[in-house]
């Protein structure tokens, strides 16, 4: 998030209106809700985690213990349990991230 001087981007009338509420302070103006994107969609982080989770489920289904998976993926046993016992549809197998 970068700082922008309001006098450089806002019309004078609007600036005077805003100054009735705030003067000399930093003001954050959020994006419109229609411009929001879900977490990880821009960076690809969600896709990577989905892929990792599907690999964890596949390993568990192939007989790897929860304890071994926790060590291999550096996650807690409880986190591994949440992943392997979740009913969420695996999307990671459909995408080639290699």
Image: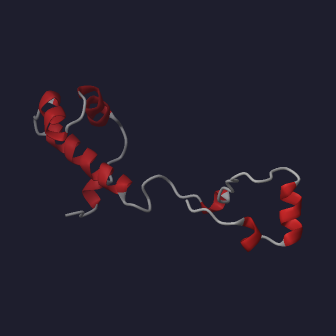
Which quadrant holds residue 79? top left
- Number of numbered labels in the structure image: 0
Image location of residue 50, percent across then percent down: 32, 50
Q: Is residue 11 left or right of residue 3?
A: right
Image location of residue 77, percent across then percent down: 23, 27
**Residue at (27, 45) in percent of width and height:** 53
Front-lying residue, 75 or 26 = 26
The quadrant of the picture occupied by the N terminus is bottom right
Which quadrant holds residue 10? bottom right
**Residue at (29, 54) in percent of width and height:** 92
Q: Is residue 96 left or right of residue 26?
A: left
Front-lying residue, 30 or 61 = 30
- Image height of 34 relative to 67, above or below: below
Which quadrant holds residue 83? top left
**Residue at (66, 56) in percent of width and height:** 30
Q: Is residue 81 left or right of residue 5?
A: left
The quadrant of the picture occupied by the C terminus is bottom left
Image location of residue 24, percent across then percent down: 76, 54
Image location of residue 61, percent across then percent down: 16, 38
**Residue at (19, 40) in percent of width and height:** 73
- Image height of 47 relative to 68, above or below: below
């Amino acid at each position: 998030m970068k700082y922008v001087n309001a006098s450089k981007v806002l019309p004078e009338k609007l600036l005077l209106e805003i100054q009735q509420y705030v003067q000399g302070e930093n003001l954050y103006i959020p994006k419109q809700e229609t411009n929001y994107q879900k977490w990880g969609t821009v960076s690809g982080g969600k896709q990577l985690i989905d892929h990792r989770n599907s690999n964890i489920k596949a390993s568990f289904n192939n007989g790897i213990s929860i304890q071994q998976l926790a060590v291999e993926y550096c996650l807690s046993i409880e986190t591994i349990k949440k992943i392997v016992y979740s009913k969420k549809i695996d999307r990671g197998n459909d995408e080639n991230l290699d």
